[in-house]
Amino acid sequence: MSLMRRALVVLLHGLNEHSGRYSDFAKKLNASGYKVYGLDWIGHGGSDGLHAYVHSLDDVVNDMKAFLTKVLKENPGLPCFLFGHSTGAAIILKAMLDPAFERLIEGIVLTSPAVRVQPSHSIFLVLAPIISFLFPRYQLSAANKNGIAVSRDPEALLAKYSDPLVYTGSIRVRTGYELLLVSSYLQQHLSSITVPFLVLHGTEDAVTDPEASVELYEEASSIDKSIKLYPNLLHDILFEPERRFVEKDIIDWLNSRT
């Protein structure tokens, strides 16, 4: 007996990773009746381009819109949700500021969204526009956050950093600058968000700011909005020891809207 399809979920990974990392989560969604699609953004995973180099995050926003159009065409009549982690969540939020695409989506789920990103050193804010123009592919170790723990699960960390599709080098200047641009753009447009959403964040996240998720929740104009903060969890909340609770919270939220 085939499982009744409830809805579609289109999944967008975070910076330096790829959609294949979410296959376990996708299987849980499948078991609950969701058809899942993943997109590797340019310079990531199976997509073309220099590894971890993104010339413009607007290109990723546009790629996501094109991918979404294709997915919806292939699945007429099925409601569609978007899931994004970290920078993937920021890309989804930027796409949802376009009313034509916001209308196509039932709701979005954001884990550890990059709504406010602080560079590791304030000088980067001054130098980034110049260096990103002159040497866009340059790897800037001073702007790196690779030493920051993203999970308390040793096995999850080992799996992440031994994955050849996960980029572990220093952040490329242009990519880092684009991340700062998109997060500052979102900061200025939080009240323009109207799509139904669930935002989830670990309180001990040192990569993206949980307080910015609270701001998103408070300032967004969405009528249907929910926030869940998990004490002690780090950045990769779907790869923490408590991931089952996070998955359940997401699936319960989706189920109540399909």
Image (cartoon, rainbow, N blue to C red):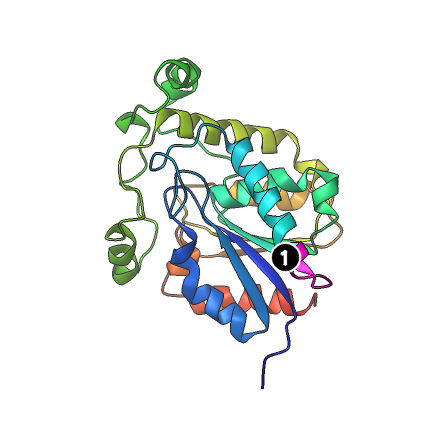
Q: What stretch is highlighted in magenta?
A: 73-81
On screen, residue 72 versus residue 11, left or right, reads right
Residue lying at 71% horizontally and 45% vertically, measured from the top left: 102
> Looking at the picture, which amino acid does disc 1 mark?
Phe
Q: In which quarter of the image is residue 184?
A: top right
Spot occupied by residue 219 in the image (x, y as percentages of width and height): 68, 40
Spot occupied by residue 248 in the image (x, y as percentages of width and height): 53, 69
23 falls in the magenta region: no
Q: How crowded is mark 1: few (under 14 residues within 10 Å), some or many (20 or more)?
A: many
Q: Quadrant of the C terminus?
A: bottom right
Q: Which residue lies furthest to the bottom in this view?
A: 1
Residue lying at 45% horizontally and 27% vertically, measured from the top left: 55
Q: In this view, does 255 lie above or below 72?
A: below
Front position in the image: 12 or 110: 12
Q: In which quarter of the image is the N terminus?
A: bottom right
Spot occupied by residue 123 in the image (x, y as percentages of width and height): 37, 18
* Element type at mark 1: strand
Spot occupied by residue 126 in the image (x, y as percentages of width and height): 42, 15
Count numbered badges in the picture. Answer: 1
75 falls in the magenta region: yes
Q: Is residue 168 visible?
A: yes
On screen, residue 172 versus residue 114, left or right, reads left
Give the residue pinned by disc 1. 81
